[in-house]
């Protein structure tokens, strides 16, 4: 799991690389970089690969891959991971997907009526949490029939989300070894500890 946070006084970024285990989150790596650009993160990951032991990642080795990555929707992070470990499966954090959609719905410039916002959000959650691909597609068709005619901006936005549904819909995760983890909230909590306790912010 992977996330970034900026530290303004030093003009640097810290990226935490975690895995989940029986005791919670286990830190694998911490990157301190001058920015959060894709090329910078790619170099950091490739440096990490040079110091990991050959039996890393349950014997697959550092050059092969971890099996699954869970990130928020940072294109720089996701692209760097794909470049360094192209065989890994990249997933989007459920919390961040829903949070971003909620914020979109409540942005007044998208002209979603107040009385429809909660209903639309519930429909979105039915798509995201569907237990099978067929159930997800049924919920998606109901979503289209219910709202696309009334909200052209919603149609455009959700069509873009739908094109990437294999990253965020849980029906695509049934065969993955993620042990029930659908968010990268371990990383978010670790950043709170880093900022509040270590940096006294």
Image: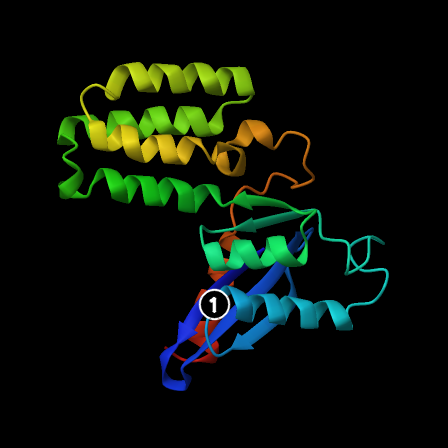
Q: Is residue 141 above or below residue 117?
A: above
Instruction: Indicate the quadrant where residue 147 lies.
Output: top left
Q: Where is residue 79 shown, x and y percent of the image?
A: 54, 55
At 52% from the left and 38% from the top, the residue drawn is 167
The answer to which of 31 and 195 lies nearer the viewer is 31
The answer to which of 176 and 23 lies nearer the viewer is 176
Q: Is residue 43 above or below residue 171?
A: below
Instruction: Indicate the quadrant where residue 81 lies.
Output: bottom right
At 82% from the left and 52% from the top, the residue drawn is 60
156 lies left or right of 200 = left
At 67% from the left and 36% from the top, the residue drawn is 176
Q: Where is residue 184 shown, x and y percent of the image?
A: 52, 51
The answer to which of 38 and 166 lies nearer the viewer is 38
Q: What residue is disc 1 on?
A: 37
Q: Where is residue 80 shown, x and y percent of the image?
A: 57, 59
107 lies left or right of 55 = left
Q: Where is residue 3 shown, x and y percent of the image?
A: 50, 60
């Amino acid at each position: 799991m992977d996330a970034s946070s900026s530290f303004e006084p030093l003009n640097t970024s810290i990226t935490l690389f975690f895995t989940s285990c029986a005791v919670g989150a286990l830190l694998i790596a911490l990157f301190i970089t001058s920015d959060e650009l894709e090329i910078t993160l790619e170099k950091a990951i490739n440096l990490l690969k040079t110091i990991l032991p050959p039996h890393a990642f349950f014997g697959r080795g550092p050059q092969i891959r971890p099996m699954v990555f869970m990130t928020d929707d940072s294109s720089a992070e996701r692209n760097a991971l794909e470049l360094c470990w192209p065989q890994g499966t990249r997933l989007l954090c459920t919390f961040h997907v829903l949070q971003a959609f909620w914020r979109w719905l409540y942005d007044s410039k998208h002209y979603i009526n107040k009385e429809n916002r909660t209903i639309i959000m519930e429909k979105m959650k039915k798509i995201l949490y569907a237990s099978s691909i067929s159930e997800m597609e049924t919920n998606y068709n109901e979503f289209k029939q219910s709202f696309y005619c009334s909200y052209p901006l919603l149609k455009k936005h959700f069509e873009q989300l739908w094109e990437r549904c294999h990253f965020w819909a849980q029906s695509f995760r049934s065969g993955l070894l993620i042990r029930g983890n659908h968010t990268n909230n371990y990383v978010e909590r670790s950043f709170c500890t880093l900022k509040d306790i270590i940096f006294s912010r």
